[in-house]
Amino acid sequence: MELLLNQLINGLTAGSEYALIAAGLALIFGVLEVVNFAHGEFYMLSSYYLYLLMTRYNLPYVVAVPLVIVAMILSGVIFYYLVIRRVLSRSWQLQLIATLALSIVMVNTAIVLSGPVPKYLESPLNSQIVQIGMASISVQRLVVLAATAISFATLYAVLKYTRIGKAMRAVAQNREAAAAVGISVEKVGLATVVAGCALAGVAGALISPLYTIHPGMAALVIIKAFAAVIVGGFGNVTGAVLAAFLIGLLEALVTTVLPSEYADAFVFGGMILVLLVRPHGLFGRVARS
Amino acid sequence: MAATLRNDAPLLALLAAAAILPFVAPSPYYLSIGINTLIIVCLAVAFDLVVGRVGALSFAQPVFFGFGAYVAALIATTFGAGFWVEALVAAVGGFALSVAIGIPAFRLSLHSFAIGTLGFATIAQLVAQNWMSVTGGPLCITGIPRAQIGLPFAQFTPRTLTEQYFLILAIAALTVFVVRQLIGRRIGLAFSAVRDDPTLAASQGIRPLSIRLSAFGAAAALSAIAGVFTAHFQGVVCPDSVATSYTVMLLIVAFVGGRGSLRGVLAAAIIFGVAPQLLRVADEWRLAIFGALLLVTVLTVPDGIERIFQLIERALGLGGRNLVPAAIATGPAAIPAEPAPATTQAPVPVEVPVGEALPGGALQVTGLRKTYGGVTAVNDLDFEVKAGELVSLIGPNGSGKSTTLDCISGLSPFDAGTIVLDGQNISGWSPARLAKAGLVRTFQATRVYTTLTPRENLVVAALGRAPTLYEWRQYARSRGATPGLDARIDDILGRLGLAAMRDRPTGELSYGQRKLVQFAASVIVPPRILLLDEPLAGVNPTIGNIFKQQIVAFNRRGLTIVLVEHNLEVVVDVSHRLIVLDRGTKIAEGDPRTVMAQAHVQEAYLGR
Amino acid sequence: MRPTARRVGVVPICLSALLAAGAAFAQAKPVKVGLSSAFSGHVGFIGADARRGIELAIEELKTANTAVAYELSIADDECTPAGGATAFRRLMDVQQVDVIIGSGCSGATLGGMPTLMDGKLSAVTYGSTNPKITEGAGVGGNPYMWRMNLNDTIIGETFAAFIAKDGVKSAHILAVNNDFGRGAAGVYQALLPKNDVKVNGADFFSQGASDLRALISKIAARSPDAILLFGEPPDCALMARQKREMNLKAKIFSRGGCYTDESLKLMGDPRLGDGLTEAAYWARTPDQPMVEAYRKRHGDYPPYNAALAYYAMMTVDQAVRKAGPSRDGITKGLAQVDWKSAIGPIKFDANHQARPDLFMVRIENGEQKVIETISNAR
């Protein structure tokens, strides 16, 4: 019972990490239909921003985090104008390859610049541990869990109630029609990419103190985030977030009863199964016309 | 023969140059670079069959390479059955594995296909990594002996680097040969068709899944054979062999070379194989540089090295047909929506031509209903079209005309109703099956295979309409002259005023001309029922006139036609009967002039 | 019998002749040493570390052995079998080296081994621990592959006995899912029961995995006396931090670098590692002059890859002293090496495996401390 409770918490905290990353991925895909293979690298980038701010400029953690998000917004603007805008009207294969190429550049540049040896950042919240019943959890993990909820609620509110959010949904439904009624696809694209990068920034700034920072840190997480986006229904942000939690829980559960190396096989086997039964994902909308 | 020789000359020269390398290389190291490069050539040329020829971005290619390597390693280290058995098991097994992966993966839209195959690749790597009793997991299979190749006169075991080099050169040459054979035959046309427009292909009777699986399977079998060689060459096979990092390399080669261009991919594979070894000075930056190279290529020269080849050819005045028009790389999204084009054509003979009689079919639609979300697009629609009749479906925008055509032609599933063709219930049939049964449609937007010529467009359409067995026998034939069929193609293109365009890429034609090509494709093998979706929309009067003539001509010969059209003047002129739809419901039916005179029809059209 | 005896007699004569010609010879033709290791990608630091160690050795040899001069070439093997084959080939045919040091990774060493036969060129690995290398070398079939460091089996025999002696009755294995982790897990699953330690289970995590909490919860529920952790320094640091968070009390015994400065630094608070014991094939003992020399040059203590590569280079020098600087001479010389190094005796057996010392290192108050040096010499 204690084990089950522990694994439930472990699954939820792991799921919230996948969810923070998957949300940005799903948003960019949902609105622009661009599969952003470099999304994981933005997560990595934001962790390095945090590292720079805290070690080079000796800023305390709570000051560095908002600055990281500002830096990620600027990075998102650059990303949009440098890559996304140029491929937005091209075929989806070219879009995918362009972001994949960017991810290769980013990872390998990070390896050269920072060295492959990982870095560690101490967050003050890391060593504060609270007891929930029999289970214990660090405050930093609770912050990640809360941040996932807040980010998702904010995103939901923006999409639902703001002008730009409504424009995003319009572009997601039909880009041509949205353009025809005077919505600037360019502005919406910029807003979407920036929002996606900011979400990656939140993920990096909050998650990286739990682990270590290194150029390949995104590789294992992003593939789970991809699985979440697929299982959740391509481009469906809510679905992706729910699926991310499902994946986290599934992993914890499989790890409990089977040798842990099977956990990934269950995740990806499950993903294939979902694709077979419901090609548009568990929570997918019906394909657009 | 002469033409073949001319086309093959550069490849043969390349092969000859590669064969000389062992005798001029300053040290065996260059041979080992050569071997690695040839492995990349094998994989990249096979991969391009999938990504370049049928347009499916697969991340699963290393799975088949790794599969071949593990098959060879397991056979060689257990019962040692020799190279041929290994290659056979690898190729057949690789093909079977690709079908097992491809059938579910190709059910996905092409975006999801890329990610889905990434999932399969991840699972394959997990299997290689964790199935300790078979693959040895991360401890690898080691001590793989040299290949034992049984030849008619002796047993050949490549031991020296030179011998290994010639073995992989032979495999690479075989790979290029097989790929060229596939592209050079009619199935190559089907590949292009499915890549350019799978929906059109399906509506012409070609099953995109079968075509894609053929390319996917052939590429898998070829990659697996390269894997067999690699296992013996390295003497050790590890889970890295199936790693997705190989896909990144293959994508770089395919895109930098130019998708669908054999020479471009060959050039890129050679550059990618050789350059890293020569660029050792920039070791740590190497991967970053390759990533940047790929990014710049994709952003600025989507056709990659192929584009450079084309520029050189143009500079040298070697015209000829571009094998790869820009449309492949830039994709359909980049083709600008063309306004009504200026007419560039000579006036066309307008008398109604005569031909042999065509036995038209009869169609009954009962209780057809289709809803999207909460919106009912078609609501309990009943109508009938008798053999040889020309019936028009009219109504304002959004009245459900195109949806009705989509349901009848199998393109979108409907919620209720039955559709009967010549007494046979055809509800729920796939577009391809309907096309083979003689129910053919055209599309409102121009849908043609832009990288094929009009002639090839019609060849593909004719193949699709043939019975499946005959279709696949035809795929094995050369894509060159098609006696009998060519005469019919010339006849119809001549009648449509497209004779001069016969062998130009269809992507270069004007909007109206492309629409005519689409029409020609729909009647190249006369169907029993032809559904025409706004043939006159957006075309200039000259072409509109041709359409009108042809519609009447084919109908007079007996073809049953269902026409959806906004040009009421033409509709009233040509139709036997009108059916008027408004918001998914039939509001009037009957003789054209009578129907048009009814007040509620006028009201539906002019609005309230 | 007779021919052997005569050859042994001849060697000293050759040697003295060589030594006589020493100084002039050194200027004329340097001995080319090739280092094959990973220089790019995620494990690129392995090569960079090893390179520093070898460069230090070569610098010292300028005065210690004036008879020959050494020159270093490097090749990137990316830690993969294919990379190993290419790198060995490149060093052999293009750089024309007289001996290869490397690879630092078992996979690359296994991939490169067959290549050596073509050029009759010897390679001395300083860091690969996969037992398969020993099985294939020397009388195992490949006369050109040598291993200076201990392999997993030798370490395992000693370490398993040590763990049992430490009072452990049950253990759970937690290992990185790569050749090192899988290989080590196999060794200890076989050896611990022989020492009356029960193995509760074995779990593997992906290389670079960050959240080990689900695994730790599961292991904690089975409450073993000890966890055997086979991973790299970042994995150890994660384990130490998450173990604290999860309040897991089991002792940790490790292999793979949990005691290293890098690992302690990554823990944030090095005291989180207290009580961890690692069986290390290299550790910073006070009687190694190279440690201070390295620190003088680079400002930091040597990482184990640097130290082991240093000793591999010194082993090569021993071989050169025995039978001359050619490829052939080094191969013959390696068979004769019998060197008392600062990390124990270096002498290759019939499978070309040397048996230097094993170091038991324990973290105490956030610092590494060698608690026992165990000789493996037979």
Image (cartoon, coloured by chain):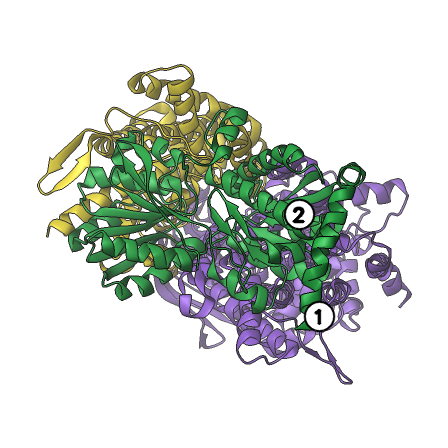
Colour displayed for chain A in the image of the structure: yellow
Front in this rendered view, residue B74 or C84: C84
Quote the CA–CA distance across marks 1 and 2.
22 Å
Q: Is residue B19 left or right of residue C192?
A: right
Residue C368 is labelled as none
Colour displayed for chain C in the image of the structure: green
Tell me which amino acid carries mark 2.
Answer: Arg
Q: Is residue A237 left or right of residue A99?
A: left
Residue displayed at 72% across by 43% down? C31
Front in this rendered view, residue B462 or B566: B462
Residue C3 is labelled as 1
Does residue B373 show up? no
Q: Mark 2 belongs to which subunit? A: C
Front in this rendered view, residue C347 or B293: C347
Q: Which residue is mark 2?
A: C321
Q: Is residue C201 left or right of residue C8?
A: left
Tell me which amino acid carries mark 1.
Answer: Pro
Determine the secondary structure under disc 1. helix
Residue B180 figure quarter: bottom right
Q: Position of residue B160 (x, y in %)?
A: 74, 66
- Specify whether disc 1 shares its chain with disc 2: yes
Does residue B118 show up? yes
